[in-house]
Image (cartoon, helix red, strand yellow):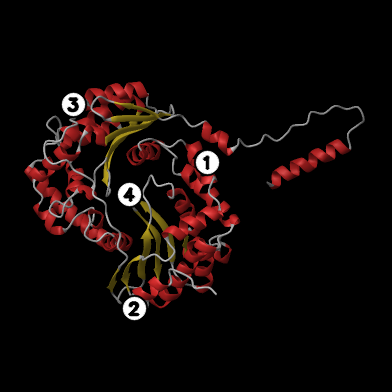
Amino acid sequence: MKMATRVLKVSGTLLRFAKPGTKYVRFQHTARPAFAQTLLNVPETRVTTLTNGLRVATEDSGIPTCTVGLWIDTGSRYETDKNNGVAHFLEHMSFKGTSKRSQTDLELEIENMGAHLNAYTSREQTVYYAKSLSKDLPRAVEILADIIQNSKFGEQEIERERGVILREMQEVETNLQEVVFDHLHAVAYQGTPLGRTILGPTENIKSISRQDLVEYITNHYKGPRIVFAGAGGVGHEELVKLVDQHFGSLKTTYEGKIPILTPCRFSGSEIRVRDDSMPFAHVAVAVEGCGWTNPDNIPLMVANTLIGSWDRSHGGGSNVASKLGQAATLGNLCHSFQSFNTCYKDTGLWGIYFVSEGLSLEDMLFNVQSEWMRLCTSVTEGEVSRAKNLLKTNMLLQLDGSTPICEDIGRQMLCYGRRIPLPELEARIEAVNAKIVQEVCTKYIYDRCPAVAAVGPVEGLPDYNRIRSSMYWLRL
């Protein structure tokens, strides 16, 4: 900016002392393309539905690499108490050899291609994807088809993977944020599938059999519940032919009982795991949010962005934009906090997670709830405008590369039944104002029973009745 100012000053000086009659060419500064115009330049998302109901969705950006994968509408929410953990177990077993490739052959083939093969399981989705050069797209699709449809699930591999998953569970126990969020789901959705963990209990991991894995695939891996997404250098027609060739035989009918997604009831309640030997308390407080397709989701996203996140190591001090961040800095209330808006098909969790010393818990929670009440009563247009700009920026930054774009395509196709174009999403965010934020926050936050999960030295955390009584303001 300073250099541009100097150039303008020099140009003005030259014109001022120029000889009469001399002609100069004035170079005008080229304005940065408008944000809306930039959104319009994004390649379109093309969707084709195969005869078995499987959907193929692509965004072709023409780059020399690509990411392709399967997004399957199933996860730990579709499990029972008996087989909780089988979806995650199945994800591990998919790379342990097929009828065509041993585990060693699979790993060598992927490595020789210079590709990456990965998978993950969430509460509502299971994902398998590959990253490769665009010229290797046919092999990547064939390998994904092989591991999904032809995995052997050998007894030796199953026993070996039990140990791997049990060690993974021990590692998760050391990640206190994961622990707190598992506790939060357990108390918020008591007695429902969303209340269970993704990894499952230890006793289930020790008892899951090959038959459990086969039954889960048979019951849930159906064409209409699968989206094959591709991004990067991916030709849509080419990918449709490849997917039809390798996945066209997937069934659409159910042999046994048809799995139906049951509603998960939210319960305002709490869980506290007190351990005074820990240096910090880890606390999550949330109210029930909304599902993916609910129109209130966008205002809740703006409100979530407005609360923001903060960490003591970030710097900025009292000059950060977030009012909660300013209070945390000036009062030394916490080491970090982050707001969250976790969505599922028909419900969600909207709240905040923070790490604080035991003696600061009461003051930190007071400031959190005061900020929530301010969202419901007196949030300003300036704050909402800042949050909208930040949300739009984060939205675009999260789509940097073929893999996050592919993930965005697969997730949105399962959640919305389509991929929302960026101009539409930007327009929906821009339509939010302070009045809408106040109305939506009042609907979901004001005088609602929160779910609370806390681990560590939590003696200083106010009891649940006090927390509940701070979810509304009495004004004269």
Nearer-N-terminus badge (2/1): 1
Query: Which disc number belongs to residue 249?
Result: 3
In the image, residue 233 lies at what x, y percent?
39, 27
Say whether residue 116 is visible. no
Question: Looking at the picture, which amino acid does disc 3 mark?
Answer: Ser
Q: Which residue is mark 2?
A: 459
- Cα separation, mark 4 vs mark 2, equals 35 Å
Say whether residue 259 is visible. yes
Question: Looking at the picture, which amino acid does disc 2 mark?
Answer: Glu
Residue drawn at (36%, 67%) of the image: 283
Q: Residues within 10 Å of mark 4 (few under 14, many from 20)?
A: some
> Mark 1: which secondary structure?
helix
* Foreground pick, 14 / 200: 200
User: Is residue 430 rendered to the left or right of residue 222?
Assistant: right
> Mark 2: which secondary structure?
loop
Q: Residues within 10 Å of mark 1 (few under 14, many from 20)?
A: few
Query: Which disc number belongs to residue 427?
Result: 1
Q: Nearer the viewer, mark 4 or mark 2?
A: 4
Please, is residue 399 above or below residue 57 in the view? Answer: below
- Cα separation, mark 3 vs mark 2, equals 58 Å
Nearer-N-terminus badge (3/1): 3
Question: Looking at the picture, which amino acid does disc 4 mark?
Answer: Asp
Q: Nearer the viewer, mark 3 or mark 4?
A: 4
Nearer-N-terminus badge (3/2): 3
In the rendered image, which quarter is residue 369 located in? bottom left
| CB within 8 Å, label 3 to label 1 | no
Question: Looking at the picture, which amino acid does disc 1 mark?
Answer: Ala
Nearer-N-terminus badge (1/4): 4
In the rendered image, which quarter is residue 7 located in? top right
- Cα separation, mark 3 vs mark 4, equals 31 Å
Residue drawn at (23%, 22%) of the image: 245
Q: Which residue is mark 4?
A: 346
